[in-house]
Amino acid sequence: QVQLVESGGGLVQPGGSLRLSCAASGSFFSINDMGWHRQAPGKQRELVAAITSGGSTNYADTVKGRFTISRDNAKNTVYLQMNSLEPEDTAVYSCNANYYTLTRTLRGSWGQGTQVTVSS
């Protein structure tokens, strides 16, 4: 199984930046896609950004040009650099990963989430 632990959330002023990290640990064969989602109060969870094991990325239209997703495969860690933050970016950010178990079964895992608050 894979355990995901996020870090880096917090309170930031509008226009500021934050960098989220999500580290995967446990027993697995390989990690495929990794991504960041967010859920604001009263809203459904939405995909923010995703990255394949080969480094291909995709972003929600609302964050294009402001957020950058990256990963370090050697560390099994995915990052989300968030710049020019807006109050509308306030949400709980969670990472997820699709991975192959040691028996080559495809599974998914989610982190517990980290709060990002953008406010003056």
Image (spheres, rainbow, N blue to C red):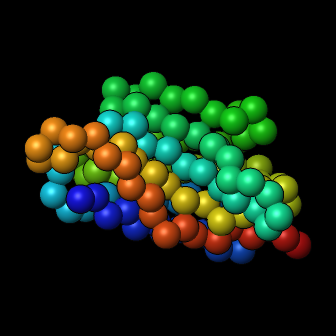
Residue at 64% across, 71% down: 115
Residue at 63% across, 33% down: 59
Residue at 46% across, 35% down: 51
Percent position (x, y) of residue 81?
57, 50
Q: Is residue 21 above or below residue 47?
A: below
Q: Is residue 32 above or below residue 109?
A: above
Q: Residue furthest right?
A: 120
Question: Is 95 situated left or right of 114 in this image?
Answer: left
Quadrant containing the N terminus is bottom left
Determine if residue 102 is in view.
yes
Percent position (x, y) of residue 45?
68, 53
Percent position (x, y) of residue 79?
47, 51
Q: Residue furthest left?
A: 103
Residue at 39% across, 55% down: 109
Looking at the image, how many numbered discs can be counted on the residues? 0
Percent position (x, y) of residue 103?
11, 44
Q: Is residue 119 above or below residue 94?
A: below
Front residue of 52 and 86? 52
Question: Is 6 situated left or right of 73 in this image?
Answer: right
